[in-house]
Image (cartoon, rainbow, N blue to C red):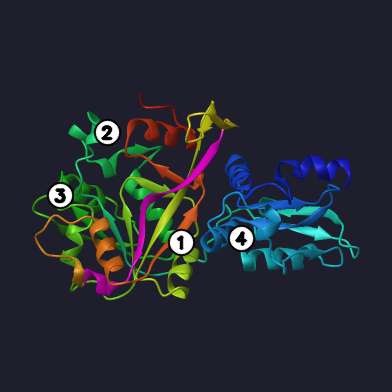
């Protein structure tokens, strides 16, 4: 591999023997969803996408699996015999972040990036997924006081827009045009905000709970309004994920409910001890790392589940999951990387999100 090419792509290279956890961390660090896999001789071997990792984790739940275990046999790559116009057409068709260019001997000779060919920012979505979206925007946001004493959590700014507009923009990019907002606390301020946006290319409808009813209780008000599969999102999260992929997974697996599980990695900065039953040292593990999937507050739901939500009762989304599980219904989990999930529901995470947007911390 030539030095100029290596300098261009070094941040995208990962060994086929590295773990999927390491691959996810690298994707987060370089802000890419695609990596170039190399073999033991540091030669190009394959491509690894975040979708490859997600499919492997869904099937095997093994964060420590090696990269080569998640690779696909058939990949979309370019050849030195293709023109740049042909490569451009294929990249646009399949929304590829970058395209490896291989010689007839399957050697990597170049990598063409989306930004080299297109002016618009790369997005992985098709913009054709027009299904309803419910945003739970009625909470008091107590973890973000004192600012939520003045404005409701959905209107807290990130850059030049409130968080709820960032959420809506991402759904609109996927194709959604109809949004249902569950409101209660400072509902008039939320309604006034959207009334003042005169050029929006989507419709906002409201349903108002007369008192706090849990993370899913207010959905009972939509029983006669939504009749298709729909998204539900908390009003304090942002996801860097192609929603079409989540929807496709949900439908292909015939799930009644699918939730996003965000990877959380925790490293213990000490050697952990395992003891025998007699209290003697059995093993020391130096600075172990553990991976968990946590509920990210984003769901795909089939409309018939609305009938299982009691009216006028305090009811959490976890209560709905318990109902589904009790009758052996299907609940799927779609994993995303740690950096792909931004939670602005508390001051620490809000300030971290501001940094990602190039803004100064609030406090």
Dots 4 and 3: beta carbons under 8 Å? Answer: no
Which quadrant of the figure contains the C terminus?
Answer: top left
Q: Which residue is mark 4?
A: 52
C-alpha separation, residue under disc 2 versus residue under disc 1 = 28 Å
- Counting from the top left corner in percent of width and height, residue 106 is at 86, 62
Q: Bin the neighbour count of mark 3 within 10 Å (Cα to Cα): few under 14, some 14-19, many 20 and up.
A: many
Precedes in sequence: disc 1 or disc 3? 3
Precedes in sequence: disc 1 or disc 4? 4
Q: Bin the neighbour count of mark 4 within 10 Å (Cα to Cα): few under 14, some 14-19, many 20 and up.
A: some
Residue furthest right as drawn? 105
In the picture, measured across the screen, residue 189 lies left or right of residue 243, that is left
- Provide the residue span drawn in magenta: 288-306
Q: Nearer the viewer, residue 224 or 263?
A: 263
Q: Which residue is mark 2?
A: 144
Precedes in sequence: disc 2 or disc 3? 2
- Counting from the top left corner in percent of width and height, residue 62 is at 56, 54
Q: Which mark is residue 184?
A: 3
- Is residue 201 visible in the rendered image? The answer is no
- Counting from the top left corner in percent of width and height, residue 172 is at 41, 60
- Label 2 sits on a secondary structure element that is helix
Residue furthest top as drawn? 363
- Label 1 sits on a secondary structure element that is helix
Dots 1 and 3: beta carbons under 8 Å? Answer: no
Q: Which residue is mark 1?
A: 243
- Label 4 sits on a secondary structure element that is helix
């Amino acid at each position: 591999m030539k030095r100029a090419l290596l300098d261009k792509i070094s941040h995208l290279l990962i060994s086929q023997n590295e773990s999927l956890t390491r691959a996810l961390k690298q994707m987060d660090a370089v802000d890419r969803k695609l990596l170039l896999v190399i073999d033991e001789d540091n030669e190009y071997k394959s491509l690894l996408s975040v979708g490859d990792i997600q499919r492997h984790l869904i099937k095997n739940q093994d964060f420590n699996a090696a990269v080569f275990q998640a690779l696909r046999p058939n990949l979309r790559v370019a050849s030195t015999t293709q023109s740049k116009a042909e490569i451009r057409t294929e990249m646009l068709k399949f929304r590829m972040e970058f395209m490896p260019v291989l010689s007839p001997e399957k050697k990597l000779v170049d990598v063409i990036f989306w930004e080299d060919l297109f002016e618009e920012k790369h997005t992985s979505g098709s913009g054709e997924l027009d299904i309803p979206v419910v945003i739970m925007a009625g909470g008091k946001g107590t973890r973000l006081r004192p600012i939520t004493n003045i404005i409701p959590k959905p209107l807290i700014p990130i850059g030049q827009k409130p968080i709820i507009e960032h959420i809506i923009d991402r759904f609109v990019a996927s194709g959604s045009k109809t949004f249902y907002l569950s409101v209660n606390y400072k509902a008039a301020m939320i309604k006034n905000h959207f009334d003042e946006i005169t050029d929006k290319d989507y419709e906002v409808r409201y349903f108002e709970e007369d008192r706090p009813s849990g993370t899913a209780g207010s959905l009972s008000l939509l029983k006669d309004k939504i009749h298709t599969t729909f998204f539900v999102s908390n009003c304090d999260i942002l996801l860097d994920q192609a929603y079409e992929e989540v929807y496709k997974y949900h439908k292909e697996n015939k799930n009644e409910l699918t939730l996003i599980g965000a990877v959380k990695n925790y490293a213990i900065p000490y050697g952990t001890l395992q003891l025998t039953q007699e209290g003697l040292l059995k093993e020391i593990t130096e600075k172990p790392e553990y991976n968990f999937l946590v509920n990210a507050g984003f769901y795909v739901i089939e409309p018939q589940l609305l009938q299982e939500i009691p009216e006028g009762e305090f009811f959490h989304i976890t209560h709905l999951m318990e109902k589904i599980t009790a009758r052996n219904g299907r609940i799927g989990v779609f994993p995303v990387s740690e950096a792909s999930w931004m939670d602005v529901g508390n001051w620490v995470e809000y300030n971290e999100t501001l940094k990602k947007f190039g803004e100064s911390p609030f406090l």
